[in-house]
Every structure is written in C-alpha cells, then in structure tokens.
Amino acid sequence: MSRYTILLGGELVRTPALERQIAGTRIIAADSGIGHAEALDIVPELWVGDFDSAPQMLPERLKAVPKREFPSDKDRTDGELAVDIALEQGASALVLAGAFGGARADHSFLHMTLALRLAEMGIDVILTSGAQEGRPLPHAPVEFDYAEGTLFSVLGFSELAGLTVTGAKWPLDAVTVPFGSSLTMSNEVLKSNATGGRLRIDLARGRALLVAHPLTGKDG
C-alpha cells in the first residue's frame, strides 16, 4: 500500500496518534500546509500550489523543497491538486493532515466531501487535525479502537438508512436518519464485553463520515 500525507492549511497539532498515522508516508504540502512541516519535523518531497498563502518565514530546508506551481486562477484548490498528484503517483491511502479548522470553513467542508469521494474510489482516507479525525464510513460493518469516553459524531451527507451503532453510550439499531438531523451528534464510546471493547458502525445506505475526538477519551 502506497501511503501519502497531504499537508493542508487547517489546524494541526502534533500528537502521538498523528505521528503514528504519518509515519513512513510520502509527504506532499499544499501551499500554506508547508508551515506544518516544521512543527512535525518532516520535509515534504513536493510543495504544490499557487503559493498565495505560503508562510513568509521558513527554514532553508523547507524553502528548498521542490515546487510545482499553479496559476492563482484555477478550478481546483491547492489541496485537491496535491491529492491528485499523490493519486497519479500511485497513492492507495491518504492522510489529509490539517483538514479541519482554519480560516476557511468552506475548505473544511470540501475536505470532508473529497474524502467521501476518494473512499468511493477505493482510497483509504483519514482526515486529521491531530486532536480530531474523520473517516468515511463504508457500506459494511467497521470497527474502531477508541478509548472509553471518546466523543464522536456520525455526519450524514445524505439520508442514512440502516445505521447501527454499538459500543456507544447511545446505541442505534438499523435506524433511518434524515439528512440534516442531529441524532448522530455527540455520542461517546462505551467499552463492553458485548462489543469486544470496540466501537462498531454498520451503514446500509447513504454517505457519512465518522468524526472522533480521541483526546477526549480516558486514555487521551
């Protein structure tokens, strides 16, 4: 599996979970995302964008990163361009680091919908800020090993049908969730012998993203 990390311009904090996720991956920075490289003590192999929001002060080792420059008048964001380049190079798994927060809520929304589209293409995708992470939900049972008390939400990008959630404070059993409902917001992981200590989610139909906050768990 060829794994890439895309450094985006949103919020990013260095955490043990983030370090594990990006370890051994190939790194591409998207415009202002290069600023995260210094905090993570990494050097990207490529820096992509129109560089209209690039940091003014960078160490020499980051200034020397090879660049692929695009015009400012373009029909894709710098982040999407970086993703496309990773896919062209054979990426089968992506960590979108810095996908949440920042000054542009529209960019955060794009990153979430982009992750859903990539997942439908068969690409393994994680969105992360270090403190929170998002994972597209497949139409098959999937388990997550989060600590007791970890806050999580299931964000629906359509009506959801046949949604079952176990290993949670508020379980659900094959429910239909209307688009725009808050039913699946602010749940908590609840360890139990019945679930083997894991959060388990099964979605029959619809597009959804699990957003979890690992630092809120008892081991966070």
Image (cartoon, grey):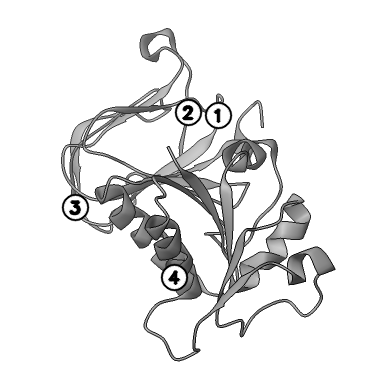
Residue at mark 1: 149
Q: Looking at the rendered structure, which numbered label has been put on residue 189?
A: 2
Tag 4: amino acid: Leu
The residue lying furthest to the bottom in this view is: 73
The answer to which of marks 3 and 2 sits earlier in the sequence is: 3
Relative image position of residue 205 (x, y in whole percent): 16, 43
Task: Confirm or deny contact between disc 2 and disc 1 (CB under 8 A).
Answer: yes
Task: Confirm or deny contact between disc 2 and disc 4 (CB under 8 A).
Answer: no
The answer to which of marks 1 and 4 sits earlier in the sequence is: 4
Q: Is residue 171 above or below residue 98?
A: above
Q: Could you give the CA–CA distance between mark 3 and mark 2, rounded to whole angstroms?
A: 23 Å
Q: Could you give the CA–CA distance between mark 1 and mark 3, rounded to whole angstroms?
A: 27 Å
Relative image position of residue 105 (x, y in whole percent): 49, 71
Single out the mark in the foreground, 2 or 4. 4
Label 2 CA crowd tier, 10 Å (few <14, some 14–19, many 20+): many
Relative image position of residue 104 (x, y in whole percent): 53, 74
Residue 103 visible in image: no
The answer to which of marks 4 and 3 sits earlier in the sequence is: 4
- Rendered residue at 49%/88% (across/down): 71
Tag 3, which secondary structure? loop
- Rendered residue at 59%/54% (across/down): 27
Tag 2, which secondary structure? loop
Tag 1, which secondary structure? loop
Single out the mark in the foreground, 1 or 4. 4
Q: Is residue 66 above or below residue 76?
A: above
- Rendered residue at 23%/37% (across/down): 203
The answer to which of marks 2 and 4 sits earlier in the sequence is: 4
Q: Could you give the CA–CA distance between mark 2 and mark 4, rounded to whole angstroms?
A: 36 Å
Tag 3: amino acid: Glu
Left or right of residue 182: residue 186: right
